[in-house]
Image (cartoon, rainbow, N blue to C red):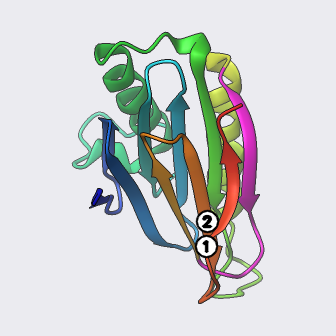
Amino acid sequence: MKHVEDIGVGKVIVAQGKITLRAIALGSCIGVAAYDAGERIGGIAHVMLPGRAPDKAVGKTRYAANAIDEMIGQMIEMGSNPPDIEVCLVGGANVLERDDDTICQSNIESVREILENKGIAVKASALGGTQRRSVSIDAEKGEILYSEGDGEKKPLWRKG
């Protein structure tokens, strides 16, 4: 049986082999799920805030740029080559359905811009709306699943 590792808010976990990584209850947060099919390395960054952390911030990986840098750095340390890393994005919903809630859209724009600047392809996404989501990645199979609300897990992406 595979080990399941939950990724809390502002956390980054990268793993290889028989493990499933999972970020649950993604509201305005974004689960950045990355995979290197050749090395079978998977990672998830549970991004809470857009942009880069201020210098004196505690919990820097709550911020998009810091979290993505940390995840890609760990993947490289494990043997990934950045051009081989593919990413899926899940979350960024306005779960409180407030007209003045802009954090969800700011998170989406920030994460997309950071990945584009790094030359990392976004292969699939389930973003926006008003439903909370969850994302998981099977590091051995290279399969990324997601769910919306209380719905069943559905495939989002699988290695080519």
**Looking at the picture, how far across and down is residue 16, in whole percent?**
32, 33
Q: Looking at the image, is 89 positioned above or below residue 15? A: below
Q: Which mark is residue 127?
A: none
Q: Which mark is residue 153?
A: 1
Residue 118 seen in the current view:
yes
Question: In the depicted view, which residue is nearer to us: 23 or 4?
Answer: 4
Q: Alpha-carbon distance for marks 2 and 1?
A: 5 Å
Q: Which residue is pictured at 61% across the width and 18% down the height?
A: 118
Quarter of the image with the N terminus is bottom left
**Looking at the picture, how far across and down is residue 23, in whole percent?**
43, 63
Badge 1 density bin: few <14, some 14–19, many ≥20, Cα 10 Å: some
Q: Secondary structure at mark 2?
A: strand
Question: In the depicted view, which residue is nearer to us: 23 or 139?
Answer: 139
User: Given the current orientation, which residue lies at the most extreme front position?
Assistant: 1
> Is the Cβ of the residue at disc 2 closer than 8 Å to that at disc 1?
yes
Q: Looking at the image, is 93 positioned above or below residue 106? A: below
Residue 50 seen in the current view:
no
Q: Which segment is the magenta one? A: 120-132
Q: Which residue is pictured at 35% across the width and 62% down the height?
A: 9
Instruction: Give the left or right position of residue 138, taking residue 7 as reference.
Output: right
Q: Secondary structure at mark 1?
A: loop
Badge 2 density bin: few <14, some 14–19, many ≥20, Cα 10 Å: many
Check if residue 152 falls in the magenta segment. no
Residue at which label 2 appears: 146
**Looking at the picture, how far across and down is residue 157, in whole percent?**
69, 47
Amino acid at the residue labelled 2: Tyr
Question: In the depicted view, which residue is nearer to us: 20 or 127?
Answer: 20
**Looking at the picture, how far across and down is residue 72, in whole percent?**
43, 25
Q: Earlier in the sequence, mark 2 or mark 1?
A: 2
Amino acid at the residue labelled 1: Lys
Instruction: Give the left or right position of residue 88, taking residue 34 as reference.
Output: right
Quarter of the image with the C terminus is top right
